[in-house]
Image (cartoon, helix red, strand yellow):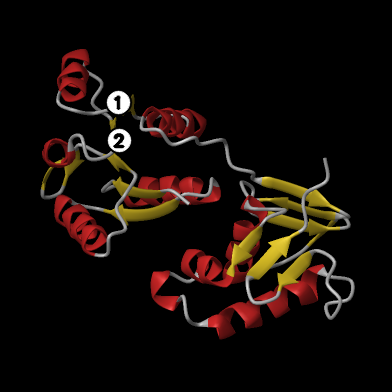
Amino acid sequence: MKKLLLVEDDTALRALLAEALRVEGYQVLAAASCADALALWQTAERLHEPFELALLDLGLPDGEGSELLKAWRGKLPLLVISARGQESGKIELLDAGADDYLVKPFAIGELLARIRVALRHRGHAVQPAQTRYQHSGLDVDLAAHRVRLHGADCHLTPTEFKLLARLVRSAGQVVTHRQLLADVWGPECTEQTQYLRLYMGQLRAKLEAEPARPQRLLTEPGVGYRLVEAES
């Protein structure tokens, strides 16, 4: 899971972008100011868990995103997202180290494509995430935040949905206990396996015909869980 830093002071846009990126399978940490962004960066460096790409707004409450661009130039792909569309300013920032520049408003699909391109240029092969899953009457649409079972809406709690979404993104593959805990509950919870057992039991109760004999959400003993591969 690629780790992204989103620096955007507009609360609504920040939430929208963060959710769209998470649906695509990215781990997103968001900041509303230069100070917040620098604090997140320092923490990631201290934990040896660096960011792999940053999205930078320019006009921030305590400074200019261009200062972050100068500080992080060459360390990771940097995409500027700004309402400022003057050609001279765009050229200046691209010359200063930005990998790309998107003028607001922009389509989420275009942003995701440009992120994939920027990561590929740094040697990371990134394909569009699997956001739709169908198997034996189970239909999961991550983008629409919708789960249906045999045509009927299935209501999941936010945590249940996050757990199922993580398994959907790796359908057919085993996801370890530690990875699930880190991605759904956070890196500080990687030893709290009781959370995982509890919520997996709740998911099975809602999605399995016989929860005690699961056919969709499978246990890989001592390793983790696997959602059966989607139908072709």
Examine the rendered structure and indicate whether residue 43 appears above or below residue 37. Answer: below
Cα distance, mark 1 to mark 2? 11 Å
User: Disc 2 marks which residue?
Assistant: 77
User: Disc 1 marks which residue?
Assistant: 101
Q: Between 157 and 228, which is closer to the camera in this rendering?
A: 228
Examine the rendered structure and indicate whether residue 152 appears above or below residue 16. Answer: below
Callout 1–callout 2 Cβ contact below 8 Å: no
Type of amino acid at the residue the image marks with label 2: Pro
- Mark 1 or 2, closer to the camera: 2
x, y percent for residue 43: 22, 63
Does 152 sit left or right of 125 as displayed? Answer: right
Local secondary structure at mark 1: strand
Q: Give the quadrant of residue 59.
A: top left
Residue ID at (51%, 31%): 109
Examine the rendered structure and indicate whether residue 151 appears above or below residue 206. Answer: above
Does 196 sit left or right of 60 as displayed? Answer: right
Residue ID at (44%, 77%): 189
Name the image quarter holding the C terminus: top right
Does 177 sit left or right of 212 as displayed? Answer: left
How many tags in the picture?
2
